[in-house]
Image (spheres, rainbow, N blue to C red):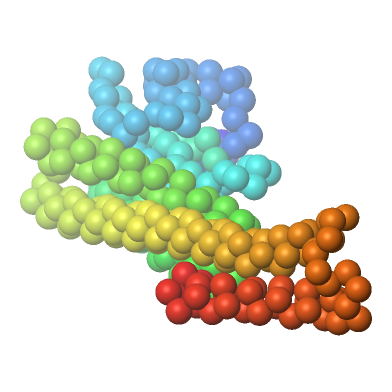
Amino acid sequence: MIQYFKNINHTTVEVDKPEEGTWVNVLPPLKQEEFTELSNKLDIPIDFLTDSLDIDERSRFEKDSTVKLLVIKTPTENNSFNESDAYYITIPICVILTHTQIVTVNSFENTAIKKFLSTFQNRHPDKKNMMVLKIFEKVVQNFMEHLKEINQRRNVFEQKLYDASRNEHLLELMRIQKSLVYFVTALRSNELLFIKLERTNFLGLNEEEKEFLNDLIVDNSQALEMANIYTNILSSTLDAFASIIANNQNQVLKRLAVITIVLTFPVLISSLFGMNVPSGFEHSPYAFYIVVFLSLAIALIVGWLFLRKKII
């Protein structure tokens, strides 16, 4: 699906065809026929339009004649039905600059483009570089918001895991860890893109736009640092819980071993007196009580010795 937006008197208006100063937004479902038609209309290489279909596409920029391509990674919710998959994944957004239009191509719907659409009435179509930087700003804000949400989820599941160690809670933490891995990888890739844009001045930015790009680099570095911190905390937490679970298992096995040893002596005494050989108590009316008393006495003494040595 292809949308055409134009800013008329600070009002976002959707038009039927690409005009000068329009923003062209390509959303799923994506069709090859639409790509071909748009490529012919705006004289854009078809590869620039289809690059967003590769979910593993890295952040980068490229130029073909007078058309510029920028690819940036943004987070989005994972709609997979597999319960072990990450909560969030990262997808590429392709931003294409032509003579008179700015084109964005998305393989999935994402909140960064929706936020940009809600503020499009404040943009100036003749300042395409600033529009690109504003899209990048929405992407960085999107990362920040999702990181805060992930951290809240982590705290909730950790508390549940403290109260009751269940496999379901460990699985939830593992899904969060997978999401953070996607975030760290994408943020590093975006950081390299921003630094290269600053160094090469690929977009031909003026002083105001360069300052805005510097702010984006700082914000992206902050998001990357947050993602690294949350990843380290989660890894340490999972390692600690693994050690706790292993220690609890050892304690249970130790107690079971002590109980087995304590019960071995009563069984041994009962077996000795249960043999079909003379024992001296076969005619005594108190034989049963003597055997029970000896068994309990020895069991209690052995148990007391284990308690004294703090084995259990």
**In the rendering, at what x and y percent does residue 117 appear?**
46, 54
Q: Please tell me whether residue 218 is drawn above or below residue 56 in the rendered image.
A: below
Place residue 69 in its image quadrant. top left
Q: Please tell me whether residue 136 is drawn above or below residue 284 in the rendered image.
A: above
Q: Please tell me whether residue 53 is drawn above or below residue 27 in the rendered image.
A: above
Q: Is residue 41 left or right of residue 185?
A: right
Q: Is residue 104 left or right of residue 200?
A: right
For the point 14% across and 53% down, which residue is it?
Answer: 214
Q: Can residue 243 be seen in this view?
A: yes
Q: Can residue 245 be seen in this view?
A: no
Q: In which quarter of the image is the N terminus?
A: top right
| Camera-side residue of 173 and 25 | 173
For the point 40% across and 23% down, which residue is it?
Answer: 48
**In the rendering, at what x and y percent does residue 52 appear?**
46, 30
Place residue 23 in its image quadrant. top left
| Camera-side residue of 41 and 233 | 233
| Camera-side residue of 108 and 63 | 108
Place residue 49 in its image quadrant. top left
For the point 61% across and 62% down, which residue is it?
Answer: 261
**In the rendering, at what x and y percent does residue 253 appear?**
57, 59
Q: How many marks?
A: 0
For the point 42% across and 18% down, which residue is it?
Answer: 47
